[in-house]
Amino acid sequence: MKKLLSLLFMVVCLITFTSCGGSEVDNRPTFTVGMECGYAPFNWTESVKTDTNYPIDGTSLYAEGYDVQIAKKIAENMGCRLVVKAIEWDGLINALEAGQIDAIIAGMSDTEERRLSVDFTAPYYRSTHVLVMNKDSKYVNGKTLDDFAGANVQGQLETLYDSLIDQLTGVNHMTPLSSVPEIITSIKSGRTDITILEEPVAKGLIETNPDLTYIKLEKGFNVSEEDVCVAIAIAKGNSDLNDKVSQVLASITEAERNQLMNEAIAKNAE
């Protein structure tokens, strides 16, 4: 009798545990997003769980940043479970085309070339391009596109940053690297003089690298509106998802976006 009661007690405990979520399965549809998880303040990687970061699929690490907060808002609004995948920049579009992810939320510019492969939502952030260098750089007082002759300038592979280098007069356009951290390492070592980044990215870098600085040109780069805006990439022809994501973005005010970006810059500096 005691054994029977003990068995019944264990069954009741198991049922109670499951009903309270201990083994509950999340049956919501997934919204799987790809990002570098290495492009602060848009996205970066953390090793410790916080109230605001999010697990990176298949790892024990967490993604944080502006893109992560935007992705969370979209998933919640659509009633989906968010899945974040860390993917190298040059593999993001391939992953989207292969159906491995539903969207790219990674500070990606909506360019004509990329539109051949993917569709884009409305922009979710607008920024300015600046020049990042060491504080003691001999180019630190440059003000125009003509003030950097002789500089070694390096951009990130397959980005607008890299293509903008050709607007600087007389510079050495170095072979692009695959990630911003690699470029910053090259600048600190003296191999590279300058890189081009969006202003929030530059701000985030300087918060954690006080030996760096950035400058805005008096007359900036010749860019289109699309070049200064970042948007979310969706698979070609998936108009239903594109419409749903764009509707969520439309509900986020400019003030909210700026606040999220400022918070991301501050978190990255902690």
Image (spheres, rainbow, N blue to C red):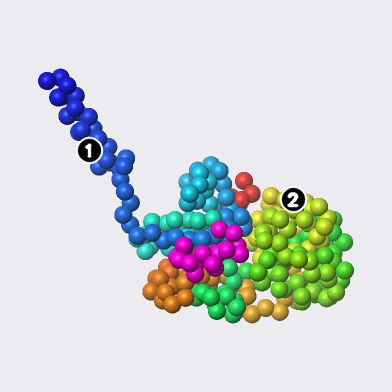
Residue at 73% across, 58% down: 183
Q: Please, what is the three-letter code of the amino acid marked with disc 2?
A: Pro
Q: Residues within 10 Å of mark 2 (few under 14, many from 20)?
A: few
Residue under circle 2?
A: 210
The quarter of the displayed image where residue 87 is located = bottom right
Of residue 183 and residue 59, the one placed in the foreground of this image is 59
Where is residue 230 drawn, in percent x and y? 57, 70
Q: Where residue 79 sits: x, y (%)?
A: 35, 60
Label 1 – label 2 distance at C-alpha: 55 Å
Q: Is residue 213 magenta?
A: no
Quadrant where the N terminus sits is top left
- The residue drawn where x is 42% and y is 56% is 82
- Horizontal side of 187 relative to 77 (left or right) equals right
In the image, which residues are magenta? Answer: 87-107
Among numbered discs 1 and 2, the one appearing first in the sequence:
1
Displayed quadrant of residue 192: bottom right
- Residue at the disc numbered 1: 15
* Residue at 50% in and 56% down: 85
